[in-house]
Amino acid sequence: MFCDCDGNDVGDIIFLTASQINHGKEWIIKDKDLSIGIAVLNMKAGKKALDGCDHKTAYSYLRFAMFLLPEDHWESNYDLSLRLNFLMASATNSCCQYDEAEQILRKGLSNARCLDDQLPSYLLMSQIFQAQGKVNDVYDTCSSILIQLGESIPESSTLKTSSGMIQETLNMYKEVGDKWLEGEKTDDKTLNTTLQFYRAIALASFFGKSRSHVVYFTCKAVQLSLQRGLCECTPLTLMQFTTSATTDENAVLCYRIAKNALCLQERFGVAAQIPELYNNFYGMIAWRFESFQEGVIRLRQGFEAGLSFGQIDMSLHC
């Protein structure tokens, strides 16, 4: 059974195979090479369960995979250890075991060899902090990473400055909007990561700083995507911008931008973005232009999607 799964996509059979093999753990741990192979099998099973939003099952497989790794696994199996550490933290976080997830991430961060390898863990760490209401920790974590990525963090921001940034961003959008929206999704991973940290720090600023800080970060994120292209995080970036930038004077344009964000999400096929997009659009933007009943239906869909993806906090917002 193990040979059949090795390097092949066998669908849900991987769960049965891994579960059967795991019963022989006393024999597995006696063979180092076999232990690594079975650890990889369990990691794949855990990843598949995680993708299917079965977080407890994912946690079980991933925990067993970590158990099988040798004591020196960070030196002898670095890439496997890095990936498994992040998946384990993700599953633990989705099960709302925040303290354990943070401990797992800190162990991974201490063993990671470069900033690129640390970025996913820092981003997940900020999400864990946010879920616990530790907005200052979110802000400090994201600002530190953004600076290392070459971005700037203002010491202060005023309403006058934020108003100017909103208009500047809207002008940039009007200049390149249609052509930009028709472009292909870029493979620029640094852009996608940077936008995610901008989103996280903007949300933390909403609770711990000022509206002008929120506007600054959401504008910077949209401008960055306008300059460097579309990526998977662009729909969320556009939607977050409209929730902070909409006024009576620019409501029509911001509504159009928000609708385009929904279209991009559908085009990219990233279903996990639905809870946040629906919460922001139907809860904060669409009420000016669409029926109340439609908003209620969509928010219910966002709530259900959030539960299925383990986004408990976003479900509650919906």
Image (tube, rainbow, N blue to C red):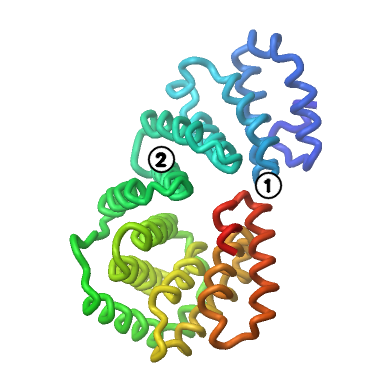
Q: Residue at x 71, y 31 (%)?
A: 6
Asked if residue 317 is positioned above or below residue 42 in the image, the reply reads below
Residue 88 in the figure: left or right of residue 224: right
Closer to the camera in the image, 101 or 19: 101
Cα–Cα span, label 2 and label 1:
25 Å
Q: Going 44% across and 55% down the picture, which residue do you hit?
A: 189
Query: Percent from the top left, x then y, of residue 101?
Result: 50, 35
Residue 247 at x, y percent in the picture: 40, 85
- In the rendered view, would you say 176 is above or below 230? below
Residue 214 position by quadrant: bottom left
Q: Residue at x 39, y 91 (%)?
A: 249
Q: Which quarter of the rendering shows the N terminus?
A: top right
Residue that numbered label 1 is attached to: 53
Residue type at mark 2: give it.
Asp
Q: Nearer the viewer, residue 306 or 199?
A: 306
**The C terminus - image quarter:** bottom right
Callout in the foreground (2, 1): 1
Image x and y of residue 139, in percent: 32, 52
Q: Is residue 212 left or right of residue 199?
A: left
Q: Secondary structure at mark 1?
A: loop
Q: Residues within 10 Å of mark 1 (few under 14, many from 20)?
A: some
- Name the residue type under label 1: Cys
Mark number for residue 117?
A: 2
State the image quarter where residue 108 is shown. Answer: top left
